């Protein structure tokens, strides 16, 4: 009998699914009442697996070639904190697509082998500068 995934394994699978640009695999790892919280001024948080699933395709299209590279992980179940480097090509600029890379931190809460809450901390001004929005 297989054991349920640990909190760290769930988060690793989630990031792998995001890097594979697979919305269904991503959403298979979040709870029905998942809260995707963004702390940036211009970022939008979303509640619920269905709402998150509906938003993922546009997100993945806007950030072509999206990749999260893990820089560090701290685990204190049910919490998993991941320092990351995000890179992609942003398609929403005024003068064509532009590559960018930024560092940030995800703070996950995992219960019953599903992510119930993800808080994303990153420097939105750095992103805007790199893609020519400011």
Image (spheres, helix red, strand yellow):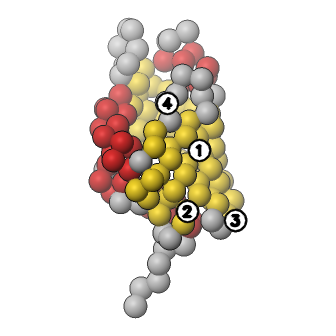
User: Nearer the N terminus, badge 3 or badge 1?
Assistant: 3
The answer to whether residue 54 shows anywhere in this view is: yes
User: Nearer the N terminus, badge 2 or badge 3?
Assistant: 3
Q: Nearer the viewer, residue 111 or 24?
A: 111
Which residue does the image show at 59% across and 44% down from the upper left? 119
- How far apart are labels 1 and 2 at the CA level? 12 Å
Which residue does the image show at 63% across and 37% down from the upper left? 121
- Looking at the image, do the residues carrying marks 2 and 3 touch, with CB atoms under 8 Å apart? no
From the viewer's perspective, is 67 left or right of 123?
left
Q: What is the quadrant of the C terminus in the image?
A: top right
Q: What is the quadrant of the N terminus in the image?
A: bottom left
Which mark identifies residue 44? 4
Which mark identifies residue 7? none
Task: Establish if 128 lies above or below 14.
Answer: above
Residue under label 3, please give it.
76
Which residue does the image show at 55% across and 48% down from the upper left? 118
Q: Residues within 10 Å of mark 2 (few under 14, many from 20)?
A: many
Image coordinates of residue 85 in percent, x first then y, are 57, 41
Which mark identifies residue 110? 2
User: Nearer the N terminus, badge 3 or badge 4?
Assistant: 4
- Looking at the image, do the residues carrying marks 2 and 4 touch, with CB atoms under 8 Å apart? no
Residue 75 in which image quadrant:
bottom right
Image coordinates of residue 14 in percent, x first then y, are 44, 56
- How far apart are labels 3 and 1 at the CA level? 16 Å
- How far apart are labels 4 and 1 at the CA level? 11 Å
- How far apart are labels 2 and 4 at the CA level? 21 Å
Closer to us: mark 2 or mark 3? 2
**Disc 3, SS:** strand
**Disc 1, SS:** strand
Residue under label 1, please give it.
119
């Amino acid at each position: 009998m297989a054991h349920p995934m640990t909190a760290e394994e769930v988060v690793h699978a989630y990031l792998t699914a995001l890097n594979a640009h697979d919305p269904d695999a991503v959403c298979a790892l979040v709870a029905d009442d998942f809260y995707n919280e963004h702390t940036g001024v211009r970022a939008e948080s979303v509640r619920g697996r269905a709402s998150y699933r509906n938003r993922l395709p546009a997100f993945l299209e806007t950030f072509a070639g999206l990749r999260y590279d893990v820089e560090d992980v701290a685990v204190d179940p049910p919490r998993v904190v991941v320092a990351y480097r995000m890179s992609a090509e942003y398609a929403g600029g005024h003068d064509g697509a532009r590559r960018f890379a930024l560092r940030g931190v995800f703070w996950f809460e995992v219960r019953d082998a599903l992510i119930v809450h993800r808080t994303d901390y990153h420097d939105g001004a750095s992103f805007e500068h790199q893609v020519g929005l400011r």
